Amino acid sequence: MSVANPRAFVVGHPIAHSRSPLIHGYWLAAHGIPGSYERLDVPPAAFPDFIRALPDSGFRGGNVTIPHKEAAFALADTLTPRAKAIGAVNTLVVEPDGRIRGDNTDAPGFCAHLDHTLGAAWPARAGGTALVLGAGGAARAIVVGLAERGLRRIWVANRTAARAEAVAALASGIGAALAWDDLPAALAGTGLLVNTTSLGMKGQPPLAIDLSPLPAEAAVADIVYAPLETELLAAARRRGLAAVDGLGMLLHQAVPGFEAWFGPRPAVTPALRDRIVADLAG
Ligand code: ATR
């Protein structure tokens, strides 16, 4: 069923912290679209019924966040190849025939942010070797995204080694798990270091690793965005390395959803970024 004013949502539990309404609200206003983007708090037990009711709800789709990304993967009618590879869904689209398509835009969001900050040649740094720290949901998406962009080697290091093996296996043929103790040796050949762990987040200890072995052309990316300038990024800047903060991934992952639900492809502008930075600071 289509309605005059397009509607989309972000669903999670809890959901109060989500910045997505601010991002999509900003774009709706910028494009003069009389639509809405709504925050929905749905507990896990109610999520299957929420998905079943979606085709007749009037929503064109929405974002899915913690703890529903795996459930959305299981409940969607169809999945994009990327969502299938990652095993989690963060974007739902209700098709005109009522079927629900599940996508994952975290991977292209992360890579689009690197394109904007480092230029499109970033996958070639240090011969195309990336090192991903952490093995949670964000790491899964990023490893799939990096593999799509033609990286030649992707190392995954994690406190719990078995999880690193599973995530490295997503990048078939080029992914390999790395023991935490072997980080110093691996850093010497790394062109892109990515922190996907929660270390460095407000209230968490910092990620304390020595960046001195990294080559001069290496870039360091953090997906933590509160604070925006983590100790890891500060250490990278002190060494003169390119440093990529976590806010860009959040902004860029929202682009494909907005386009699917509301029509125009929105731009990630400095003004939008400033708006979110101000909100995070407040
Ligand atoms: P997300 O879905 O956001 O990636 P997650 O699945 O909770 O979140 O993953 C958090 C990541 O941070 C994991 O890689 C976790 O390591 P474990 O798999 O060993 O749990 C990592 N992490 C969290 N706290 C950590 C700490 N104190 N030291 C090292 N790694 C930590």
Image: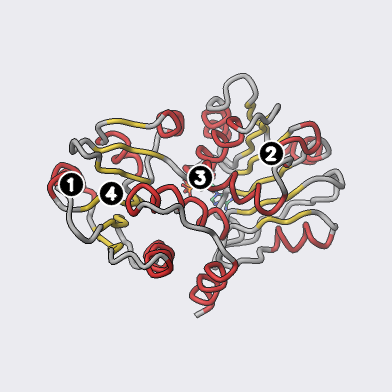
Q: Which mark is residue 122?
A: none
Q: Which residue is denoted by mark 2 in the rendering?
A: 131
Q: Earlier in the sequence, mark 3 or mark 1?
A: 1
Q: Picture coordinates of residue 47 (x, y %)?
A: 21, 47
- The answer to which of marks 4 and 3 sits earlier in the sequence is 4
Q: Amino acid at mark 1?
A: Leu
Which quadrant of the structure image shows residue 227?
Answer: bottom right
Residue indicated by mark 4: 61
Q: Which residue, given by chain and number where applicable, does mark 1 sit on?
A: 54
Q: Are marks 3 and 1 in contact (CB under 8 Å)?
A: no
Question: What scheme was used to colour the molecule?
Answer: secondary structure
What secondary structure is found at the residue carrying circle 3?
Answer: helix
Element type where label 2 sits in the image: strand
Label 1 vs 2, first from the N-terminus: 1
Amino acid carrying label 4: it is Gly
Label 2 Cα neighbours within 10 Å, binned few <14 / some 14-19 / many ≥20: many
> Disc 2 residue type?
Leu
Q: Amino acid at mark 3?
A: Ala
The verdict on label 3 being within 8 Å of ligand 1 is: yes
The image's mark for residue 138 is 3
